[in-house]
Image (spheres, helix red, strand yellow):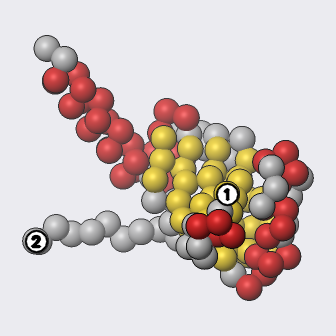
């Protein structure tokens, strides 16, 4: 197969100014401004892990953020949340979600999510004749 794979972007997940992990935010919901993906914890994650195992209300107090590799902190109006199911499902079952990323920034950062969504809409409209 000769498909070229798009180089994935990496984002840092921050607690205050400390990098607690990274993610590629490889999935998304463009109309909602949501991007999510596997969370790759750094050694610093142990400092907040217990709070990430609790409900989102407790976790909201952490004020997590996402930083693009170019240094920009991405505005996420709905916050950043870590869903850690590693205790029940294994060490790779940690996901991070960035909520409320506005346009046009969302399209700039995640063109692949927008293209996939547009393709899905097009397929639905073509199939509904």
Closer to us: mark 1 or mark 2? 1
Seen as rendered, the residue at the extreme left is: 1
Picture residue at 24% right of the left edge, 26% below the top: 124
Residue 67 appears in the picture as rendered = no
Q: Which residue is mark 2?
A: 1
Quadrant for the C terminus, please: top left
Helix, strand or loop under label 1: strand
In the rendered image, the residue lying farthest to the front is 88
Rendered location of residue 102, percent (x, y): 59, 39
Q: Is residue 32 above or below residue 85?
A: above
Which quadrant is the N terminus positioned in? bottom left
> Which numbered disc, 1 or 2, marks the residue that appears first in the sequence?
2
The residue closer to the viewer here, 54 or 103, is 54
Q: Which residue is mark 1?
A: 83
Q: Position of residue 81 (x, y in %)?
A: 71, 54
Q: Which residue is located at x 16 percent, y 24 percent?
A: 126
Label 1 to label 2: alpha-carbon separation: 35 Å
Badge 1: residue crowd in 10 Å (few <14, some 14–19, many ≥20): some
Residue at 55% x, 35% y is 32
């Amino acid at each position: 197969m000769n498909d070229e794979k798009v180089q994935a972007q990496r984002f840092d997940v921050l607690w205050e100014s400390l990098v607690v992990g990274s993610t590629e935010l490889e999935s998304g919901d463009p109309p909602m401004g949501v991007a999510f993906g596997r969370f790759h914890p750094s050694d610093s994650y142990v400092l907040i892990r217990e709070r990430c195992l609790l409900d989102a209300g407790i976790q909201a107090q952490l004020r997590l953020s996402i930083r693009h590799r170019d240094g920009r902190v991405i505005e996420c109006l709905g916050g950043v949340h870590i869903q850690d199911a590693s205790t029940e499902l294994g060490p790779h079952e940690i996901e991070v979600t960035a909520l409320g990323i506005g346009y046009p920034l969302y399209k700039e950062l995640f063109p692949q999510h927008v293209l996939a969504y547009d393709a899905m809409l097009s397929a639905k409209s073509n199939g509904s004749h």
